[in-house]
Every structure is written in structure tokens, then in C-alpha cells.
Image (cartoon, rainbow, N blue to C red):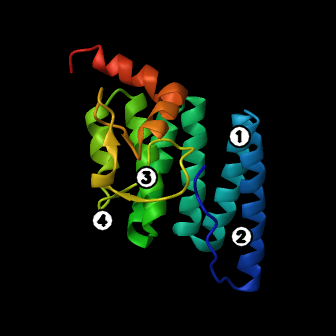
Amino acid sequence: MRDFVHHFYFDPVTKKLIDEAVAFNNQAHVLSRQGDYAGSERLHLRALDIKLSAVGENDVTAVTRNELGEVYIKMGRIADAEEQLRKAVSVRLRTGPAYDAAVSLENLGQVYEAKGNFEEARKVRRSHPGNIMVCGNNKCPGKTFHQSQLLACSGCKSAFYCGKACQAKDWRARHKKLCKAYTNTDH
């Protein structure tokens, strides 16, 4: 999870609702780190319902949609992840900041990797209008990069990294199985 909490001004009633939703999101993060993805999903969905009723579809809800998409990726629920991340990307590309949009684009790229569609994964990751991307290693500190600063995976050329150390970490944690399956087939 690489999102940052943004500070917005809300009237007192709306602020109370958003604070309640954020508390659910925070509890969901704890459950996700513990491997309780179903519990995490349940809390993120509660937070999303509260946020949607309080402020509608905007950057506040996009935060939760992105987090929910990340949980669905971990659960292997790729279609659900794609749905949430597409909605997050749509909002984040309109409202910014650039980092948030790049995170959601990276997550959506991981969805396409999981579907075996590496061409679409590359296209999505590189689709930020400002040519902004994040490192494909989700443990990389929250920083944006210009596309030209990142190294593409030499196998699939679809995942992008800020350096060899991040590429090696993501290779072991996530990318290896997907990349090898892709590069060992005719595409």
C-alpha cells in the first residue's frame, strides 16, 4: 500500500463520516498485513460505502478503490481488482496528484500481468499524461519517476523499476512467475 492520506476540508458532519471510513481503511490495512484479505475487503467495502454516500465518486473514494484493488490482487480476484482500479485511475488522472495516479496505473498494470496481457500492462503503466510512473516494486519508497528514468524488465519489457535492487526484490516477491510464463510462450 503506497497511498498517502490527503487532507481535505469537509463540513463537520461529512468529516465525521470520512473519519469513520478512514478508521475502517486503517483496520483493513492491519488485516491485509496479517493475511486476512476477506476481512480487509469487508472493511474497505464499508469505508467505500460511507465515502460514496458522504462525498460521491472523487479522490477520497479513489484512495479506497485503489486499496481494495490491491487486496483483490492478493486474493487472486483479478476481475474485481480491475474494476476497482479502473475507477480509481479514472478519478486520479483527473484530480491528481500525479503520484496517486501513477500508483493506480501500476496496480492496474499488475492486473494485466496477472491476466497474461503484458502488452496492455506496459501500455497502462506508460499511460500517465505526464509520463510519470512509480517503480514496479511496491516496497519502493513513494516517489514518482519520469518514464525515461526507469529500467524495463529485460524479459517481458512490461514492468519498470528504478534500479536493479528494486527489480530483484519484485522478481522474487511477485514478477518472476508471471514473467517466466509470458516469456516461455509464443506471444
Residue flagged by tag 2: what amino acid is it? Ile
Looking at the rendered structure, the secondary structure element under dot 2 is helix
Label 1 Cα crowd, 10 Å radius (few <14 / some 14-19 / many 20+):
some
Residue flagged by tag 3: what amino acid is it? Val
Residue flagged by tag 4: what amino acid is it? Gly
- Who is closer to the viewer here, 30 or 152? 152
Looking at the image, is mark 1 or mark 3 earlier in the sequence?
1
User: How many angstroms separate mark 1 from mark 3 (CA)?
Assistant: 22 Å
Residue identified by numbered label 2 = 18
At x 60%, y 31%, the residue is: 75
User: How many angstroms separate mark 1 from mark 4 (CA)?
Assistant: 32 Å
Split into 4 quadrants, where in the image is the C terminus?
top left
Look at the numbered discs 2 and 3 and tell me whether their residues touch, using CB distance below 8 Å. Answer: no
Residue identified by numbered label 4 = 130
Q: Percent x, y for residue 148? A: 27, 53
Q: Which mark is residue 134?
A: 3
